[in-house]
Image (cartoon, rainbow, N blue to C red):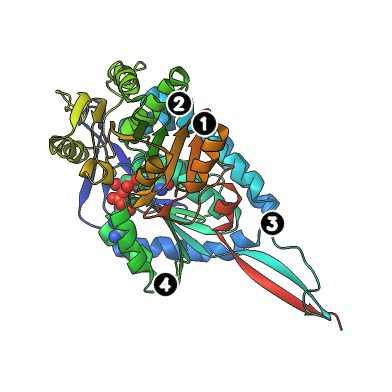
């Protein structure tokens, strides 16, 4: 076993060790082995990161959009040149199967950089006009100042980039606070990025969410907090952010309904749904977790999906054949196992339902049938390789069940009837709805939840505009 990677904060262009006396170890979820170490930061370290970002803001925001865009394109190229190393770090840190890390996830991050690099040059504002007689008006979009990005452990580098790329191209400077469990790839990328960015433009500070994260959220010099994580932490952050006026984007938990009508093209749907349930071991806010199935097709559907899930290759994320990797930690696996073990008497496990023996935090691909709307497994975000099945009688019943949860992040509808598909799209209260697909996203489109899943957008034009403020200018023509 090689010695652990030593991680530091990145503050003002330099690698700086945290100044507490606490060492944190980072584990490979496939093996339980220590893969990295860092010294926890203090709130003074966090203050230094914000001060560096604040000092870098005037010069960075004064660059033209074209100049910032060019640097982002170069960052995309740098990321691409180091893609294999970063993908490997996501595999040993977050348990991403190699196939996902190099096939989908890291190239997707490069694509996001390129999207934001381009979009940053064409930020739109309202057309200028003579709205007040004798005056002409126009609108400026300006950067906000210092942006704080707080990221979760399930998509460490992806989430960091969807925050820092739009923030930077719009002219802000950035502090990222990575999740405690998965700090490696974000730190490595930030180290590399210092070759291209002026000191202080991008800073990374490690620390506990409830200490360093909370301090940063309350910091008066932070102008916007972009948070992705659990609904519970999001609520605490919203309260803390209220202490000083600042903008907030909250990307919180999901609990996606997957509405299966009897005219589904089952053969085409099965691989998409299997991936939708098992992608990132189900630790995905848009996971296809809550299957609502027409009673007309229920038996055939459940049998086919269970067979597809049971056939999935499970193993060390570093093995090329692995499709279903580990959960992030022993604690996360125990949480999923407890939810399944508390199964109500009216439900049954069709396939899976157990932890896998041996090192690492593996859990079987699991399908549970016979659930009812008020059951804990339906109402909670499971965040593991587990899908639940409920039946519905008609369209109204399906839509009522789809919407009767707190979350509203993602959903999918499966039917070949276009009118029914569009009625469902209109009625489902969620920020993303797929028709005959699930999970496919690109950086050009906006993502973000309704209801308990938060507010604000990431991606698309809306996700870029979040990082700007609008100023109206009215000029007398006399
Ligand atoms: P988490 O809420 O435990 O932690 C997320 C981050 O917030 C971490 O960096 C943590 O240190 C920090 N944090 C925690 N408490 C804090 C506080 N009081 N103040 C400041 N920072 C604090 O979430 P997690 O377990 O890492 O991530 C999983 C969750 O993220 C799931 O609920 C998932 O659905 C959600 N998620 C949502 C989206 C989306 O786009 N809506 C995307 C990915 C993940």
Q: Position of residue 17 (x, y in %)?
A: 32, 52
The answer to whether one can see residue 285 in this image is no
Q: Are marks 1 and 2 in contact (CB under 8 Å)?
A: yes
* Label 2 SS: helix
Q: Which residue is depicted at the point 74% across and 77% down?
A: 474
Reading the chain from its start, which is encountered first: label 1 or label 2? 2
Between the C-alphas of marks 1 and 2, the distance is 7 Å
Mark 2 or mark 3, which has the lower sequence index?
Answer: 2
* Residue labelled with disc 1: 107
- Compute the Cα span from label 4 to label 2: 39 Å
Q: Which residue is mark 2?
A: 102
Say which of 424 and 111 sits in front.
424
Q: Is residue 194 above or below residue 209?
A: above
Q: Report the residue that reaches farthest toward the right.
A: 478
Which residue in the structure is indicated by mark 4?
Answer: 220
Q: CA distance from mark 2 to mark 3?
A: 34 Å
Residue linked to disc 3: 124
* Position in image of residue 60 (x %, y %): 60, 59
Q: Determine whether 110 is above or below 234 in the image.
A: above
Q: Is mark 4 within 8 Å of ligand 1?
A: no
Q: Is residue 26 left or right of residue 166?
A: left
């Amino acid at each position: 076993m090689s010695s652990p990677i030593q991680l530091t904060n990145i503050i003002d262009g330099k690698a700086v060790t945290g100044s507490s006396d606490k060492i944190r170890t980072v584990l490979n979820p496939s093996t339980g082995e220590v893969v990295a170490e860092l010294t926890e930061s203090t709130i003074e370290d966090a203050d230094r990161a914000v001060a560096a970002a604040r000092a870098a803001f005037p010069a960075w925001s004064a660059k033209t959009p074209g100049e910032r865009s060019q640097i982002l394109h170069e960052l995309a190229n740098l990321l691409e040149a180091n893609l294999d190393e970063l993908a490997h770090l996501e595999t040993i840190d977050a348990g991403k199967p190699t196939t996902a890390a190099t096939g989908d996830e890291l190239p997707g991050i490069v694509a996001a950089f390129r999207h934001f690099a381009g979009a940053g040059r064409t930020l739109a504002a309202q057309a200028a006009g003579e709205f007040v007689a004798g005056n002409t008006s126009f609108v400026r979009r300006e950067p906000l100042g210092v942006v704080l990005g707080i990221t979760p452990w399930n998509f460490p580098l992806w989430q960091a980039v969807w925050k820092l790329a739009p923030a930077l191209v719009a002219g802000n400077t950035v502090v990222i606070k990575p999740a405690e469990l998965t700090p490696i790839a974000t730190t490595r990328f930030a180290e590399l990025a210092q070759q291209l960015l002026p000191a202080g433009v991008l800073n990374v500070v490690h620390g506990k969410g409830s200490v360093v994260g909370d301090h940063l959220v309350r910091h008066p010099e932070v102008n916007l907090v972009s948070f992705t994580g659990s609904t519970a932490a999001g609520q605490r952050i919203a309260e803390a952010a209220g202490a000083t006026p600042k903008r907030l984007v909250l990307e919180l938990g999901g609990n996606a309904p997957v509405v299966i009508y009897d005219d589904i093209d089952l053969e085409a749907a099965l691989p998409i749904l299997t991936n939708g349930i098992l992608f990132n071991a189900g630790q995905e806010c848009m996971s296809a977790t809550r299957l609502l199935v027409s009673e007309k097709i229920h038996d055939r559907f459940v049998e086919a999906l269970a067979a597809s899930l049971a056939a999935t290759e499970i193993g060390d994320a570093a093995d090329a054949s692995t499709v279903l990797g580990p959960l992030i930690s022993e604690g996360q696996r125990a949480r999923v196992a407890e939810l399944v073990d508390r199964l109500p008497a009216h439900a049954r496990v069709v396939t899976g339902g157990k932890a896998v023996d041996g090192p690492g935090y593996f859990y079987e691909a699991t399908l549970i049938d016979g659930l009812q709307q008020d059951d804990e497994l339906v109402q909670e975000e499971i965040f593991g390789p587990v899908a639940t099945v409920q039946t519905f009688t008609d369209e109204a019943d399906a839509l009522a069940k789809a919407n009767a949860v707190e979350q509203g992040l993602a959903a999918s509808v499966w039917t070949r009837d276009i009118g029914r598909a569009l009625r469902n799209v209109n009625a489902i209260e969620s920020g993303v709805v797929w028709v005959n697909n699930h999970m496919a996203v690109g950086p050009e489109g906006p993502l973000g939840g309704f209801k308990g899943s938060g507010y604000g957008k990431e991606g698309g034009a809306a996700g870029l505009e979040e990082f700007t403020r609008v100023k109206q200018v009215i000029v007398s023509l006399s």
